Structure formats: C-alpha cells, structure tokens
Amino acid sequence: MAPNTNAHAFPFFDAIGRPELKTDPRFDSPGSRTANSGLYFEVRKQGLRRRRRRSGWKSSTGSTSRPRATTRSTTFWMTRISTMSASSLRRIIPAKARSGRTRPANTFSGGGREKLTHAPKLGEHTSEVLAEAGSIRRARSRR
Amino acid sequence: MLDPGVRRGGRYYNRPAYDPIVQSLSGVAGTFERATGEPRFVPMVMSDHTSGLIAAQAIGFALYRREKTGKGEAIDVPMLENMASFVTSEHLGAMTFDPPVVRAATTAC
C-alpha cells in the first residue's frame, strides 16, 4: 500500500481500524506524514499485518484507484513468465545453442530489430562509422 | 513518447502507477525478502528514476532513427515492464537456456 494523499490515507486509516489517525498531527497531511515517515511506515506495516481478503481492502478503501499492490517476488515472475504482459520468452536458435530471451519492455512504432546479428568483429564497421561521421576519405583509404 | 505505468493492454494496465506500486509488482521489493525475509522498498523513487533514464535513452534512439530515415515514431516506455526486466535480468539469466538451469537463478544475490 502506498497511501500518499489524504484521499488515499484517510480511507486506509479507516480500513485498518485507526480512524483517530486522521486527526493525529503526525499523520493528518502529506507533509506531516512525510515528516514522520518512519512512524507512518510502522503504522502501515502493523495495519497490513491484520490479514484481510483483497475484496475487503477494496471495499474499505473505496475506488480501485487506490494505490495498492501485491508484492511480487522474483520467483513469481520467473515461474509465470508466460502470463506476464512484459516478458514472454521468445525462443531463438543461435548457431550452437538454443535459448530464449524476453520480449523488449519498450515499444517503438517504427519497429524493432527482429533479426539477431553477431557481435561486431574488431574493425568490421569502421569504414561505415567513419563515412557516417563525414570522414569519406579515411573510409575509402581503409577499403 | 508515452511513459505509462504499465504496457497498454497488460493485465495491470488500469492500476495506478506510483513508484511503490511498481516496486511491489515488479519484484524489486521482493528481492529484499529473499535476503532478509521481509519485502522492503528501496528508499528512493527508483522506478521513476530508472524509467526516466530508459525513456531518455529510447528518445535518443528514436531521434537517431529519424536522422537516418527522416521518419518519427511513437514510443511506449512502461514502468512496470521495464522494472520487471531490470530485476529479472540477473535472476532470469539461467532460465533462458533450454533446458533451463533453474538453480543458477538463486545465485544472483
């Protein structure tokens, strides 16, 4: 839970059974909660230790726009890769070994690189880079 | 450039995208649980900063493509997917092999 604004924090205080915190000068505004961030963290920690079903939190805190999320472990992501919107493995077959890689997290409307190439060998693209940098004469001399 | 909390169409697309939410869902907080037994946030807005840096990088790539081709493009830089990728780059490494080397994932930290 990350209740930052009063619109988030006050329903949260109600949800954990601590409505008096809404008028507590240590927690009654974003500034005071920031100033007492250590205490505020403990309040959230203690409050969340009271186990409640997700539907209970949802109804207590009102809108689904409340800032709350389950802590996912790395094991979760690694064992459920196929359900992630972020990274479904794409199998590639290099020359000697078979492995997969995750789908890139970012999307470019102009498209991304689909064809994998090898790591450049020393000097493989020197002429091309020199030509691009404007040094045509030096590029030609290297050919 | 669009810098949403979650990739469009993703299962968490309609969730609010605050840094602690992204840290929780992406597994950042969960990495502490593996070490200390309790999930904790990184005490800074790491997801915001990291996504911002990645977005700047992506803009640079797009500008380079525009220089080469004369065409602009739209970019999506979702915070959750980028942070999940950030976290799993070490932890997922050995599982990308076929067959996966599962035990190697536990040596990342």
Image (cartoon, helix red, strand yellow):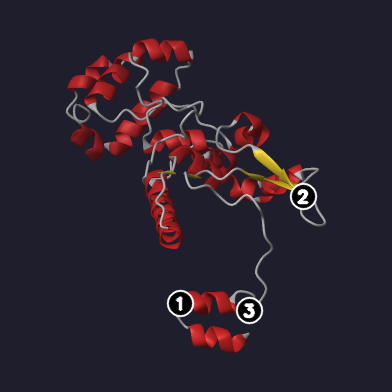
Sequence order check, earlier mark of 1 and 2: 2
| Image position of B95 with respect to A26: above or below | below
The residue located at (79%, 49%) in the rendering is A98
Occupied quadrant, residue A15: top left
| Image location of residue A80, percent across then percent down | 65, 31
Q: CA distance from mark 2 to mark 3?
A: 26 Å
Amino acid at dot 1: Ala
Mark toward the viewer: 1 or 3 = 1
Please say if B102 is above or below A59: below
- Secondary-structure class at tag 1: loop
Q: Secondary structure at mark 2?
A: loop
In this figure, which residue is indicated by the disc labeled 3?
A123
Mark 1 — residue? A133
Q: Which residue bears the numbered disc 2?
A: A93
Residue nearest the viewer, comparing B73 with A38 = B73
Q: In the visual, does A26 lie left or right of A124?
A: left
Q: Residue at x 63, y 49 (%)?
A: A114
CA–CA distance in space, label 1 to label 2? 35 Å
Q: Position of residue A106 (x, y in %)?
A: 49, 44
Residue at image point 22% right, 39% down: A35
Q: Secondary structure at mark 3?
A: loop
Q: Amino acid at mark 3?
A: Gly
**Number of on-image labels:** 3
Residue A49 is situated, as x and y percent measured from the top left of the image, at 45, 22
- As rendered, which of A45 and B26 lies closer to the eye? B26
Dot placed on the residue nearer the N-terminal end, 2 or 3? 2
Query: Disc 2: which chain?
Result: A
